[in-house]
Image: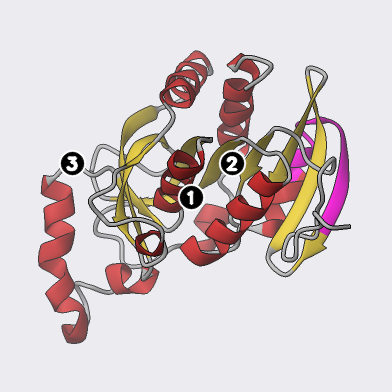
């Protein structure tokens, strides 16, 4: 079919008007179980897609893989076949001491410290979340009794450069920049949010991002056992609750 998308291997009718975007394909099935009548649509490369229903409306989840380039591909192909609302659901490393392990962060905007979006628009263009999604996710998180923060996220391309900045001489030139983000009240780091916000704004789509904190300031690694035991379901449920609050034609 002409509209079969090359990377995600989905076509119009396979997906809903809203999609959750985890990075990890392994999280898609768990998210899909929160839908009504979920079904696996396609799995190709880093992209796994399920579609189900939410209050009678189709809703999808599609993994993006790690980083902004593959995220841009997922968003472009999903929007080409009818998705108009996107919410990133992923993990993040905190920059602020009050943003603690297991907390939720609803991104209001993002620092475009990655190499993908400058190919679309100059860096002076802001990466800003859809306001309705921000308010809906904050309300849902607080109603559920979660510790939830609203703030700016820094999206970047080099995870281990940040994690090792304080322990290896060749990374020390990055320390002043990291301190700058701390002083600037940037809440946390990820690798995808700025791309979702920028492309959604350019395409006239809704873009949101909610993240679970898995690494705190001063930690130089990510503990797989600690993170593996962390329940990400509250984050998924908050994103779904926000979609429920949108108008049916959103």
Side of 183 where 13 appears, left or right = right
The magenta stretch spans residue 38 = yes
2 or 1: mark nearer the eye: 1
Which residue does the image show at 46% across and 42% down from the upper left? 211
Side of 51 where 189 appears, left or right = left
Per the image, the residue denoted by label 1 is 91
Is residue 154 in view? yes
Q: Nearer the viewer, residue 222 or 109?
A: 109
Is residue 62 in view? no
Q: Residue 185 shows which numbered tag?
A: 3
Magenta residues (range):
30-42
Q: Are marks 3 and 1 in contact (CB under 8 Å)?
A: no
The tag earlier along the polypeptide, 2 or 1, is: 1
- The N terminus - image quarter: bottom right
Q: Nearer the viewer, residue 13 or 207?
A: 13
Q: Which element carries disc 2, helix, strand or loop? A: loop
The tag earlier along the polypeptide, 3 or 2, is: 3
Q: Are marks 2 and 1 in contact (CB under 8 Å)?
A: yes
Which residue does the image show at 62% across and 35% down from the upper left? 84
Residue 117 in percent (x, y) is at 39, 59
**Gap between marks 3 and 2 measured at Cα:** 25 Å
Q: Which element carries disc 1, helix, strand or loop? A: strand
Residue 54 in percent (x, y) is at 77, 23
The magenta stretch spans residue 75 = no
Q: Quadrant of residue 158?
A: bottom left
Per the image, the residue denoted by label 2 is 232
Residue 94 in percent (x, y) is at 32, 49
The tag earlier along the polypeptide, 3 or 1, is: 1
**Gap between marks 2 and 1 measured at Cα:** 9 Å
Residue 209 in percent (x, y) is at 47, 39
3 or 2: mark nearer the eye: 3
């Amino acid at each position: 079919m002409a509209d079969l998308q090359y990377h995600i291997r989905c076509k119009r009718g396979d997906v809903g008007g809203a999609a959750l975007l985890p990075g990890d394909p392994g999280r898609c099935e768990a998210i899909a179980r929160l839908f009504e009548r979920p079904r696996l649509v396609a799995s190709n490369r880093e992209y796994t897609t399920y579609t189900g229903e939410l209050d009678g409306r189709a809703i999808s989840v599609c993994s993006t893989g790690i980083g902004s380039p593959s995220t841009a591909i997922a968003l472009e192909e999903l929007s080409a076949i009818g998705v108009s609302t996107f919410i990133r659901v992923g993990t993040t490393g905190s920059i602020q001491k009050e943003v603690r392990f297991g907390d939720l962060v609803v991104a209001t905007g993002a620092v475009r410290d990655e190499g993908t979006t400058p190919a679309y628009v100059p860096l002076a263009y802001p990466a800003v979340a859809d306001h309705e999604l921000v308010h809906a996710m904050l309300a849902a998180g607080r109603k559920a009794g979660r510790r939830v923060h609203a703030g700016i996220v820094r999206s970047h391309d080099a995870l281990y450069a940040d994690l090792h900045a304080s322990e290896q001489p060749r990374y020390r030139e990055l320390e002043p920049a990291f301190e700058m983000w701390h002083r600037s009240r940037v809440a946390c780091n990820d690798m995808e949010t700025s791309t979702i916000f920028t492309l959604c704004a350019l395409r006239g789509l809704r873009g949101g991002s909610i993240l679970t904190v898995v690494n705190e300031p001063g930690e130089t690694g990510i503990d797989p056992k600690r993170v593996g035991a962390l329940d990400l379901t509250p984050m998924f449920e908050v994103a779904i609750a926000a979609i429920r609050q949108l108008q049916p034609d959103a």
